[in-house]
Image: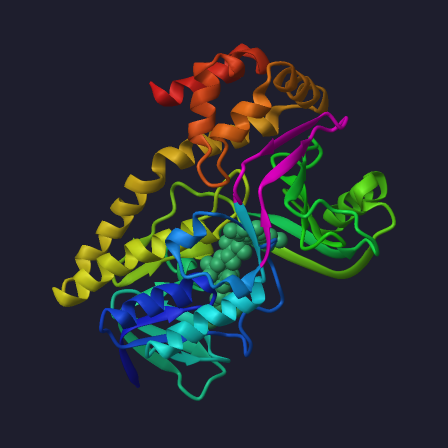
Amino acid sequence: MKNYDVVVVGAGPIGSTFARSMAENGFKVAILEKKKEIGVPLQCAGLLGKKIKKVNILPDEFIINSVNGAFLHSPGDTVLSVSKSKPEAYVLDRVGYDKFLAELASNSGVDIFFNHKVANVDSINGLVSLKNSEITKISGNVIAGADGHSSIVSRSFNLPAESFQAAQYLVDAGEKRFKNDFVHLYVDSKISPGFFWTIPLSETTARVGLFADANYQDLTMHLNKLISKRPELDGVSILKKYYGVIPKQDSHKRLVKDRVILLGDAASQVKPTTGGGLIMGFTSAEMASKVASQALEAEDTTLLENYSKSYNDKFKKELKVQIMVHKVFKSLSNSDLEYMFRKLKEEGAEDMISKFGDLDTQSTLIKEMLKQGIIFSILPKMLSRRLSSLWK
Ligand SMILES: Cc1cc2nc3c(=O)[nH]c(=O)nc-3n(C[C@H](O)[C@H](O)[C@H](O)COP(=O)(O)OP(=O)(O)OC[C@H]3O[C@@H](n4cnc5c(N)ncnc54)[C@H](O)[C@@H]3O)c2cc1C
């Protein structure tokens, strides 16, 4: 049986990043990955806030496009235009980036085993059992479950994660159609609390998608409808179709048990409002790496529990706000949304959103909107009160 200090399940971006960090800290690390090729099929819009450069290495070659702003569309097409003077987000080649992160891990000394599907984890003894593989068991003093939304590792001590479904097309307009430094986001109560997006890769091509609490058939129907009614998408050719899963935020999820920790989608580390997971996942991988290194050095795995604490200290408040925003959105009808957009436009909120809006941290904007009284003019009293109570 092979023995490692750390065994990571899943060579997604978060698993590779955590594994690299542990290897750089001097530990013997293995990644077990069920696929034979990393990163495929693409299951991401690849839109990442500029913070990405603070939380992980991102060479320019993986940035397809830079985005300065967004057109936010109401159901009746009242449009709020929000932007910053500098790039606020990047559109990534996610497949290339996932492969790059795994390569970095490998260059740091991590052993990556492809075609190694984990079937079971014994959290007390640190034993990972494999399915259909020559090696049947691998042991690790610390096991990290970074095996995505349907995590086997998480299921060994948590309930199965609930999730949203997502669908996305790669489209080609055949002519210059997209303002390539602006994304379009469209809300519609039929898919709330999810939303639609058009994320340009260039002036002619874009990723068009949505996430929602719906099955793939309904997602496809909604997406096709969006394409047929939006002028910027009129007559586009669909080059590829992708489907994926976004875990729902679960504040009761345990992140640590015995020798096991969870990371990334396996830990439901996604922003409730946007479904984006990379920045939270990378930030958590860094926290986990610090804690796991201390636990291994001290030969005391009870210290792993400090990872849950660091995670809560960092994210609990923001997640609470985003979960509340999500709930509020879900409760609004299309006429409520329309009213809200018109009111925001009338009150000059585009400037405020441009100034305080942030793809990753929405509490700053909500707090400012409460301070300036805008929330009270766009939402029913009961909902505004619920939002403002988060700061009491
Ligand atoms: C349509 C869509 C659009 C998205 N858009 C964005 C976006 O714009 N920005 C953003 O930040 N996030 C976005 N996300 C979310 C983002 O893709 C995820 O948060 C991210 O991929 C999580 O990374 P991860 O490493 O935790 O998991 P994953 O990327 O899912 O990697 C998990 C790895 O574990 C492997 N694995 C699974 N089970 C086993 C097993 N039993 N044994 C061994 N290996 C296993 C898998 O093969 C996979 O390689 C989007 C998601 C979807 C579906």
- Residue depicted at x 49% and y 29%: 355
Q: Is residue 124 left or right of residue 362?
A: left
Relative depth, front residue between 210 and 107: 107
Residue 183 place in picture, x, y as percent: 65, 43
The relative height of residue 169 versus residue 106 in the rendered view (above or below) is above
- Looking at the image, the residue that sits furthest to the bottom is 134
Q: Nearer the viewer, residue 343 or 18?
A: 343
* x then y, percent, for residue 340: 64, 19
Residue lying at 42% horizontally and 37% vertically, measured from the top left: 319
Residue 76 is a magenta residue: yes
Chain part drawn in magenta:
64-88
Q: Is residue 122 visible?
A: no
Nearer the observer, 74 or 268: 74
Q: Can you give x and y, in whole percent of width and height, for residue 230 in the image?
A: 81, 39
Q: How many marks?
A: 0
Image quadrant for the N terminus?
Answer: bottom left
Image coordinates of residue 244 in percent, x first then y, are: 62, 56
Task: Decide whether residue 18 is among the magenta residues.
Answer: no
